[in-house]
Amino acid sequence: MTTLKCISPIDGSVYAERPVLTRGAAADVVAKARAAQVEWAARPLAERVSLVMAGVAAVGAMNDEVVPELAHMMGRPVRFGGEFGGFNERASYMAEIAQTALADIEVGEDAVFKRYIKRIPHGVVLVIAPWNYPYMTAINTVAPALIAGNTVVLKHATQTLLVGERMAAAFHAAGVPEDVFQNVFLDHDTTSALIGARAFDFVNFTGSVGGGQAIERAAAGTFTGVGLELGGKDPGYVMEDADLDAAVDTLIDGAMFNSGQCCCGIERIYVHESLFDAFLEKAVELVNGYTLGNPLDEGTTIGPMASVRFAEQVRGQIAEALAAGATAHIPTSPQDDGGAYLTPQILTGVTHEMRVMREESFGPVVGIMPVSGDGEAIALMNDSDFGLTASLWTADLARAEAVGDRIETGTVFMNRADYLDPGLCWTGCKQTGRGGGLSIIGYHNLTRPKSYHLKKVTT
């Protein structure tokens, strides 16, 4: 039997392991979810909302245990306190808008006809969640899917093996029926087989481009709805009228926080040539102030990457860039062990011929280039296979809107970065994927429209 193992980036030890379900046992899980869905959907919306939010609160009550557990599993320093703030914010917003988002669309009623459109839950939703923000990324779909009347099967990343167990236990303790929300441990073959057999009515996946392609291949011909949030190479653009200190603080934090392992992390920065030297000087000073180390230590501000393999990919991009003429500005940290502990790095002299400016890094490295103005910056921002977010820095709202209209991206930020607003649709374009989470559109993607055209009997 296959066993999934979480290898801690702290010391390379096995932190947790779980056996995967057999294909038959996995099919039984889905059958239970399908059987439970009708009754769950029949419950009043307010009751579903209440139970889901009680589950969210129960996860929050575990936070003292969750924070060091996350440090062990994926390396985020304990000083940052976990994810419950964002976890709760997203679920709470989706709960608040549920009645409006799921309300019938009234088309018209007269003496002869009544016409309206309902939002109907898909049925059984599979959520495949990533390790980098394991609670927040999962709740993006789990909360609205359950509130909308779906049942949910959660498959979490091996790197954060215990997150799904904790969420399921919390929700069950709060009163959500066990068959309505189930956590599973599956290998790739069983997952693909279930999707291919149309076991699920909707699949939401957050992860790599390759993973998204595997999901699409498995779902091909089944007509199963698929939502995908995949890779990113998010740019920042600092215009000549930007608040320089705020731009440096936010963009560099967006590039380095969580060891650069953020879906909408900043991976390339374009700075107007008039501010380039000052921006670089401040950015280098900021990163030189970081403390790389064991994430269980309160003094650590940047921990190891989640695995040695991920760190090796980033080291490879940096080495290739340096060999091609780029300049590294951060000296190697004494704590950089050549493994998961990786020195955060700022590069200049980079070009778009280098992998570090084109391929997803998902690590603590950022390339910074000077630009002459909006035209050059827009061309460079769009010169990417990805499109999740872009961060614009200017005092001119109209200019930001105009530049934003020309960027191929899912979200345009002005004077902020690396934040997911649950009131806005979380979406992307190009190889970043398709679909949309959170906001009213998130509910629309987790339900289907059903039209009613009712002719009245008249005498």
Image: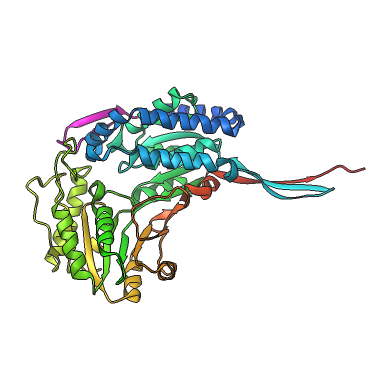
Residue 361 seen in this snapshot:
no
- 458 sits left or right of 93 in the view: right
Residue 385's image quarter?
bottom left
- 72 sits left or right of 42 in the view: left
Residue at 18%, 44% in the rendered image? 308
Residue 153: percent from left, percent from top: 45, 34
Q: How many marks?
A: 0
- Quadrant of the frame with the C terminus: top right
- Quadrant of the frame with the N terminus: top left
- Figure coloring: rainbow
Query: Which residue extends farthest right?
Result: 459
Residue 277: percent from left, percent from top: 18, 69
Q: Is residue 51 magenta?
A: no
Where 190 sits versus 114, above or below?
Answer: above
- 317 sits left or right of 19 in the view: left
Magenta-tinted stretch: 1-23
Query: Which residue extends farthest left?
Result: 334
Where 455 sits versus 318, above or below?
Answer: above
Residue 363: percent from left, percent from top: 23, 51
Residue 424 seen in this snapshot:
yes
Q: Which of the pair 93/445 is nearer the observer?
A: 93
Residue at 30%, 54% in the rendered image? 265
Q: Which of the pair 186/93 is nearer the observer?
A: 93
Residue at 45%, 37% in the rendered image? 194
Q: Is residue 22 magenta?
A: yes
- 21 sits left or right of 339 in the view: right
Residue 251: percent from left, percent from top: 27, 58
